[in-house]
Image: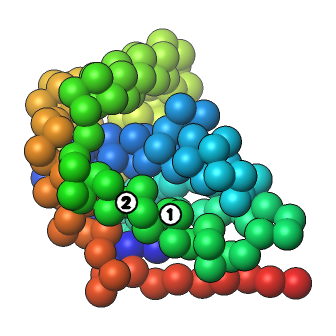
Amino acid sequence: AYHVPETSSEEYYTLDIMKSILGEGKSSRLYYSVVSDKQLAVKISVFIPNALDPTLFYIYAVCARNEKVEDLETAVYQEIEKIINNGVSQQELEKVKNRRLVNFYQEMATINGKADMIGTYEIFFGSYKKLFEAPEEYKKVTAEEVRKVAAKYLKKSNRTVGILTK
């Protein structure tokens, strides 16, 4: 877990995009690398809870049988370092932005989704009106911003690691 700012932070949208690049879906960097390619994990996920105060950027992985947890941990750090050192491609960024926007509009398609989003933006962003700015905020995120935010927050001095064994 890496310490990150509260949901209302100006870096929220960049962190959310970075979360998706690293761990959303089977084409995400971490899933592809540690689950599909190296087969060090059977499951990996990345999430950031909405919070009024500074929160955490979680990376959660389940080690594959007969694999060393240290190898899995190292592989996760290697993927993070690739973003810090090399950034993300424009194609990768656009794919994630498009997915975020599709998810946003799908959620807004139902009464329940609208109510949830209005409440979320009122509580965590300070005003429900910011909900209407969200699509543009996602579109404004650049590859360089993703790299800078990764370098700022996804560093050794800013993380806490917990390993659970049976």
Residue position for label 1? 76
Residue position for label 2? 80
For the question of whether residue 120 can be seen, the reply is: no
Q: Secondary structure at mark 2?
A: helix
Q: Secondary structure at mark 1?
A: helix
User: Does residue 103 sit above or below 60 in this rendering?
Assistant: above
Q: Position of residue 83 (x, y in %)?
A: 29, 52
How dense is the environment of label 2, judged by Cα within 10 Å: few (below 14), some, or many (20 and up)? many
The answer to whether 77 appears left or right of 71 in the picture is left
In the image, what residue occupies the spot 86% across and 65% down?
Answer: 65
In the image, what residue occupies the spot 14% across and 57% down?
Answer: 148
Q: Are marks 2 and 1 in contact (CB under 8 Å)?
A: yes
Mark 1: amino acid: Val
Q: Position of residue 6 (x, y in %)?
A: 28, 64
Q: Position of residue 131 (x, y in %)?
A: 26, 32
Q: Position of residue 158 (x, y in %)?
A: 31, 81
User: Does residue 165 sit above or below 35 in this rendering?
Assistant: below
